[in-house]
Amino acid sequence: MLRITDTIALADWELSESFTRSQGPGGQNVNKVETAVELRFEAERSPHLPGPVKTRLKRLAGRRWTTDGAIVIRAEETRSQARNRELARERLVELIRQALVAPKRRIATKPTLGSQRRRLTAKAVRGEVKSLRGKIDDTD
């Protein structure tokens, strides 16, 4: 059971972990210890997340979202398997918490009368400057 908020918690069947060898330098243990963690969360099938949250989560997850609707998070920062598990779970919780926040609706507003007048006077001044750039006729 992974607790996201006071009201949302993910069941164990929704999460699966697999362990692989970590990349990069690691000394003597590098070829025999599987410390990297790949956390897989079945987001599309999750009954604990509402529909709008799932769509926001899909957009936030980006390429971590698989074609079958799961989120795959890979953690291989530390040389400790337990710490990598914690890091992967923390990242998943943070991602879901970001998806829980609904974006504010934008309220369309009209430009003020003063700003409209300022814009029009600026356009008139600019047009006057541009009209003075033309060729001068020497018909004297």
Image (cartoon, helix red, strand yellow):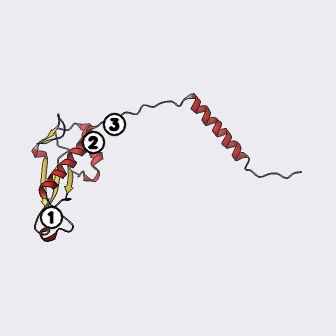
* Above-or-below relation of 18 to 14: below
Looking at marks 1 and 2 on the same chain, the residue that comes earlier in the sequence is marked by 1
Q: Which residue is drawn at 45% across and 31% down?
A: 108
Q: Where is residue 35 in the image (x, y as percent from the top left)?
A: 13, 61
Looking at marks 1 and 3 on the same chain, the residue that comes earlier in the sequence is marked by 1
Q: Which residue is drawn at 64% across and 39% down?
A: 123
Amino acid, disc 3: Pro
Mark 2–mark 3 Cα distance, whole angstroms, equals: 10 Å
Q: Where is residue 11 in the image (x, y as percent from the top left)?
A: 11, 42
Asked whether the beta carbons under mark 1 and mark 3 sit within 8 Å of each other, the answer is: no
> In this figure, which residue is indicated by the disc labeled 3?
103
Looking at marks 2 and 3 on the same chain, the residue that comes earlier in the sequence is marked by 2
Q: Which of 25 and 50 is in front in this view?
A: 25
Mark 1–mark 3 Cα distance, whole angstroms, equals: 39 Å
* Above-or-below relation of 13 to 102: below
> In this figure, which residue is indicated by the disc labeled 1?
21
Horizontal side of 16 relative to 71 (left or right) equals: left
Q: Position of residue 95 (x, y in %)?
A: 24, 45
Amino acid, disc 2: Gln
Say few, some or many: other residues with alpha carbon within 10 Å of mark 3 (under 14 / 14 to 19 / 20 or more). few
Horizontal side of 56 relative to 18 (left or right) equals: right
Res 6 label: none
